[in-house]
Amino acid sequence: MKTIIMLTVFILLAGSRVLFAGETIAVDTGTTAWMLTSTTLVLLMVPGLALFYGGLVRTKNVIGTMMHSFAAMSIIGVIWAICGYSMCFGDSHGWCGWNWDFFFLKGIDASVNAETRIPDLVFAMFQGKFAIITPALIAGAFAERVKFRGYCVFIAIWSLVVYNPLAHWVWGGGFLTGTAIDFAGGTVIHISAGVAGLVLALYLGARRGYPKIAMHPNNLVMTLTGAGLLWVGWFGFNAGSSVASGIQTAQALTVTQVAAATGALTWILIEALLHKKATSLGFVSGMLAGLVVITPAAGDVQVAGAIALGIIASIVCYGAVIAKGKLKYDDTLDVFGIHGMAGIIGAIGLTFFLRPMDGRPEFLTQLWYQTQGVLISIVYAGVVTFVLAVIIEKTIGLKLNETDEMSGMDHSLHSEHGYGLLNLN
Amino acid sequence: MKTIIMLTVFILLAGSRVLFAGETIAVDTGTTAWMLTSTTLVLLMVPGLALFYGGLVRTKNVIGTMMHSFAAMSIIGVIWAICGYSMCFGDSHGWCGWNWDFFFLKGIDASVNAETRIPDLVFAMFQGKFAIITPALIAGAFAERVKFRGYCVFIAIWSLVVYNPLAHWVWGGGFLTGTAIDFAGGTVIHISAGVAGLVLALYLGARRGYPKIAMHPNNLVMTLTGAGLLWVGWFGFNAGSSVASGIQTAQALTVTQVAAATGALTWILIEALLHKKATSLGFVSGMLAGLVVITPAAGDVQVAGAIALGIIASIVCYGAVIAKGKLKYDDTLDVFGIHGMAGIIGAIGLTFFLRPMDGRPEFLTQLWYQTQGVLISIVYAGVVTFVLAVIIEKTIGLKLNETDEMSGMDHSLHSEHGYGLLNLN
Amino acid sequence: MKTIIMLTVFILLAGSRVLFAGETIAVDTGTTAWMLTSTTLVLLMVPGLALFYGGLVRTKNVIGTMMHSFAAMSIIGVIWAICGYSMCFGDSHGWCGWNWDFFFLKGIDASVNAETRIPDLVFAMFQGKFAIITPALIAGAFAERVKFRGYCVFIAIWSLVVYNPLAHWVWGGGFLTGTAIDFAGGTVIHISAGVAGLVLALYLGARRGYPKIAMHPNNLVMTLTGAGLLWVGWFGFNAGSSVASGIQTAQALTVTQVAAATGALTWILIEALLHKKATSLGFVSGMLAGLVVITPAAGDVQVAGAIALGIIASIVCYGAVIAKGKLKYDDTLDVFGIHGMAGIIGAIGLTFFLRPMDGRPEFLTQLWYQTQGVLISIVYAGVVTFVLAVIIEKTIGLKLNETDEMSGMDHSLHSEHGYGLLNLN
Amino acid sequence: MKLITAIIQTDKLERVHEALVKAEINRITVSRCTGHGRAAETDLYRGQEVAPDLISKVRIDIACNEKFTDAAVKAILESAKHGEAGQLGDGKIFITHLEECIRIRTGERGTEAI
Amino acid sequence: MKLITAIIQTDKLERVHEALVKAEINRITVSRCTGHGRAAETDLYRGQEVAPDLISKVRIDIACNEKFTDAAVKAILESAKHGEAGQLGDGKIFITHLEECIRIRTGERGTEAI
Amino acid sequence: MKLITAIIQTDKLERVHEALVKAEINRITVSRCTGHGRAAETDLYRGQEVAPDLISKVRIDIACNEKFTDAAVKAILESAKHGEAGQLGDGKIFITHLEECIRIRTGERGTEAI
Ligand SMILES: Nc1ncnc2c1ncn2[C@@H]1O[C@H](COP(=O)(O)OP(=O)(O)O)[C@@H](O)[C@H]1O
Ligand SMILES: Nc1ncnc2c1ncn2[C@@H]1O[C@H](COP(=O)(O)OP(=O)(O)O)[C@@H](O)[C@H]1O
Ligand SMILES: Nc1ncnc2c1ncn2[C@@H]1O[C@H](COP(=O)(O)OP(=O)(O)O)[C@@H](O)[C@H]1O
């Protein structure tokens, strides 16, 4: 009788109307609701990033720069549904995963995950947004001097040969799964994007005139707006990575909020100390550092740890950006200086602030796991990106020629102008 | 005993604290959460649309154009709560529905739908956002040359005599309910708006100087931002239309994402082929075509179908826009070329890609149902819009006079300037 | 056996994996999902406010004004997690609450509220966003003439000595809890911010040249965008304040939508009557008045009441803004005229439109409760703000000196320019 | 050669441009400016009528040979006026002497290059 | 008639305008421009001090009759200077000869029309 | 003293500026303008090629002493041209006589003040 009652209860209560032969997995509508929301929030980060990056370049490149984010949204959007999900979360085959069932997402059309109780498609879409945002982040490193065609091909292949394998290793059942903690993508997303950005910035060389000519943000209002959307979207990014709607979700959201606030505050305090001014760009840079640093750690540290990580990340990233100025390489929007550095600090630093919990490995073991994850991510992303960049540059071309760079990407690549309002019309 | 246990379980578990006399319908907090979120997301599309449209007109009309969307938000927002919901979802009386209980939403203040298990008010608000966005879409067709007063009166009446009946027929229990598939509003929203736009564009005539004088978008950054918000909001639009938080929701979200990505990609590939440039406006146009085409189909096609529909929609809409240029009529922001055309393709084309499912009508039957829905929508919206436009133009006036058109709507209708920053202040 | 079954059901169904010794509180994933979403939506209001305010000042102050909102996000963000939550929702000690367990949110790391069934952290974060937005609102009253350093110190202390106690009294178990109805913050948020703004505007004096020199909004497009985000975010603000995902949530969302729409419509109708023009700034002012007025009332009035309150609020606020012009004091962005006035109307006016419900106090009793809440809020916020302002002005300085005011805050305080695009770059 | 600088109302740009083209003056340079003259346009700001200090205007620069000067001025005068009587704020035309004009593309100088 | 063109710092526009009005010069045309001179203003960009190449300036054009020229120049000189000693970047005044001035509204010409 | 006004293509600003600096002309004033000449640049608008009526240009104003005039013109001519043959739309240089130049900071006048 117990069984009968339970089944009745299942069917009546759990809001699920799809039952499977043999096994009965009811959708948890609440968790599903939050994961759908998270998916939407992470998607919101893409226009957020477009605004953030777009506002920082010169007027003549604003559309071209925004298009980098948007292009990722569509190119990776398609690739992911076709084969990306399969490569990341299919059955493990060493270098990457694969599962013919996941091809075109056909086999998961109506399936529900037994543990999280959300439809598999929701998870696939949530993860897809991460795959979209990662190459979009890289674009900041070589902003203002890259061909659109080359960029599109680059991110498509990069996603296949760098992102998908890495995500598989860390999250999808690959050889790092279960050792390195990477809650929402410190290594997979920020370190890999940061390192790829650095490699490309170095390989493609600086913009004409850099660093002699000052290159002003064309629209800080836009950058601040984008930063706001990024903060908001990051709640989906981190809290969604719990793939639940419960206590760990709440924990992740809390530390995300605290780390972002701390990072921002730290950066403007540094500026206030050194220059007696607090800039808005400093604010959002610190905020970003805080958000990135907490990304790998969001499920596993507490408020005090988040504050500590936020402070450290802001200080180190501030230093990294200054160092770039000294070293005179042209990582246009500091993808390495902020995403790369904060990602590394977060991935390794989280070990020091882990929430006490049964069954954790020893401190040093965990520290080694983390370091290993970081190193593998750096080396793999670095090497493969370099090879890929060389191939694309030599074939279809990646770096914009000088004339087009001077006309600006908007005119030369897209035949458009960002701000018609500047003209009389 | 079974009953006792079950009742206890209900009360304790289902998060519901409101029980009704006789029947006991517990709110499904998860589904409710997602529907609340969807409502919010669809509302976000209104400022999204304001940005999208606003960026495409000339500087002197930017505020006036944004106001079209905002005005819809408030005018339809009030009308819907008073009587719109009743006309759409009240008991069927042929031309429209009506239920005095729904007047001022009084009778559903605390009721819960037995099937979806969400409060009726949530459904009413979700549907209300659709009623808001539809007239706002039309505004693009006669942008830059319409009186604000006439526009306000027009959308108020149009909503009552075109939108509400149509929605009632297709969704609210009217004569098309149960035959034509229109998951989230291909016929009700996009076709009706597209056709209404076309009629108005033809009736009101072109803007002064069109097509001789090139009319540049004043702010593509704004248009891209708006496009981003539209993509994000569309998740609420389509995935919310499942009125659930489960597998169909996930399916709708997935194909929405894929169709948008495919549409955008297709359009810029066409441009790349024909002009060797990929424009941002092309990107968002294709994205929009993809989003519109999947709207009627979102619950019933799979990933491969979404890709196919996205490609077809982008190609056809591209053609439609070119054709407009040749035919020299002035559908300012291509409401018909994009919403109308993609809506038609989606509504009919979905028949070819339906997810196999028991109990579906035969292919040809379904195709006829769909065609019928499309035709009724075109004819009804077209004729009534025309009559309405004539009446308003002849009485209070709809078309802006030439002097005011040349000064710009912002100055002549609203006494404002969009960008004070262009002046010295 | 009953117990065994129930426990099994609990564990299997309710999606909760964290059980507590002795008591077993399962997380309601649905309610949690909506509360997480609400938290995110309220956070979205902060960039929304930054855009709203930022667009209304002169070009030279756009960044400085946006920074006011962003700074609140980070400063209060940190303070709240450390001690703000404890002061508001800790055990009552008269002036404020306190609970060492809540210090750094340590003690609620994994606890779940027995009644609402959401993790306590979610509630803490949701409430934290309210604490952030309140001081950010004040900033509008003395926009364009305040030192950044002074402002930062001011909001930090104001939050501790004004906001936290007030919130504790009304919501956290203090002496007003259970008497005055303040669903989502009419007294705690809008009245306190409005009054604080008024006091500061009077104390600091007008901007140079006010009211002789016309000071134009630098970017109404931005203001409209911000208004859109505010409307969207307000759904989280009000509907989230039900701390549920059910019928009351739906009710709150509905009246929020209706009041905003009515307020906006009323304002532009007034303008149309008086000036034959309907402005976009008028639209958003009315919208804001409607949103504010419904804030204290959202859970307790119905659609008709929302319409009435929206109309009244718009009319009164319109009058208040005109009166300010006559009285010639410089509340730059009408924080008192809109937030203060509409907050007062809402808090008192709601008594007239309460949803009939068992167990309500008598009309006059309730009216007295409401008036009492309003008066206490006005007097307390007014006096403490004044004292605080004087102290800060005399020590580190709050008012910008004339030279810096003329150069603009962006240049003099932040060394930045909002719109690089105006320059050639 | 003369340099004609006209400050006109923004809503007249299209018409003035058309009039100039009709008068066979095809090359012009246009820019935004802000003027303070006798005109007082009002904006609405939250229910208050506000007369901005500085009003948006358009500046048109035309370099032309002597014999075209009168035609240009005439075209502007006719097309830039609001109504028959003109309006406060309709603008001004300034004429200065242009010593030299060089076409960058070809290096031509003088009246040829205009 | 003369055409006075002053390039000044942006934060001085309000003061210069006031000074001109006091000197009874009511009609001016103002526009944004960007200057490269000897001044070096610094912006902060992610912790680095950046001296932009081109700095925002304001350009004021005043057409006036000869007898007002000195008053106008004096008003600008006094109001546009930063501090007693002036600052690098305070700007320049350029004066050219204005051959003709026409009021569009009325068609008046010459000194009347200024 | 002369006032040189050059209207050039936007993508050449950087090069022209560099060329001027090389020719020891350090002080310039730059502004945005929109030109209508013989050039026809096309933009893409939803698949249609659109030739805007008015094209973005940059205006450079240089006040200089007579002896620098030729150097300045030469620098501009060389650096502003697209390719060897030049392109439609490369722009124009206008030269007018400058009667007076005053440095606001010091009050210096004339050739000193340039
Ligand atoms: N003397 C002048 N110097 C500079 N600009 C002027 C002068 N007179 C007029 N203007 C410009 O022309 C515009 C129109 O002038 P206004 O005085 O309103 O015209 P009117 O003289 O026909 O009434 C002004 O806004 C200003 O930009
Ligand atoms: N010879 C010139 N030609 C054109 N513009 C000039 C000239 N000299 C100065 N300017 C303008 O004046 C501004 C201030 O010049 P600057 O050299 O900084 O002043 P100062 O000579 O007092 O140090 C410059 O930014 C530039 O716009
Ligand atoms: N006579 C003129 N008066 C004013 N501006 C001119 C004149 N001729 C050219 N210009 C400016 O120079 C720009 C380039 O002129 P264009 O005719 O395209 O060059 P080209 O004569 O070398 O073909 C134009 O866009 C316009 O701004």
Image (cartoon, coloured by chain):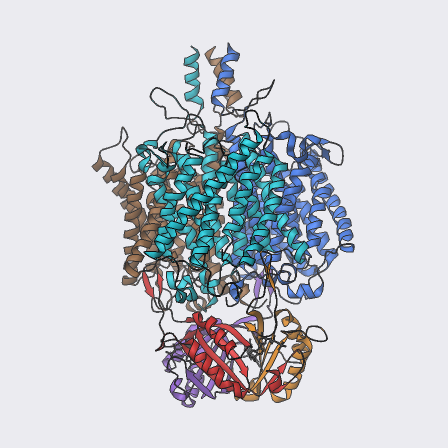
Chain colours: A brown, B blue, C cyan, D orange, E red, F purple
Q: Quadrant of ligand 1?
A: bottom right
Q: Tell me if residue A387 can be seen.
A: no
| Image point (49%, 83%), residue name | E71
Q: Is residue F39 left or right of residue F107?
A: right
Give x and y (percent) for residue A20: 50, 24
Q: Is residue D26 left or right of residue E44?
A: right
| Image point (67%, 63%), residue name | B405
Quadrant for the C terminus of chain A, please: bottom right
Q: Tell me if residue B263 can be seen.
A: yes
Q: Is residue A25 above or below residue F43?
A: above
Give x and y (percent) for residue C126: 43, 38
Q: Is residue E54 above or below residue B42?
A: below
Q: Quadrant of residue B293?
A: top right
Give x and y (percent) for residue A203: 33, 59
Q: Quadrant of residue B62?
A: bottom right
In depth, the one of A407 and C26 nearer the eye is: C26
Q: Is residue C398 left or right of residue C222?
A: left
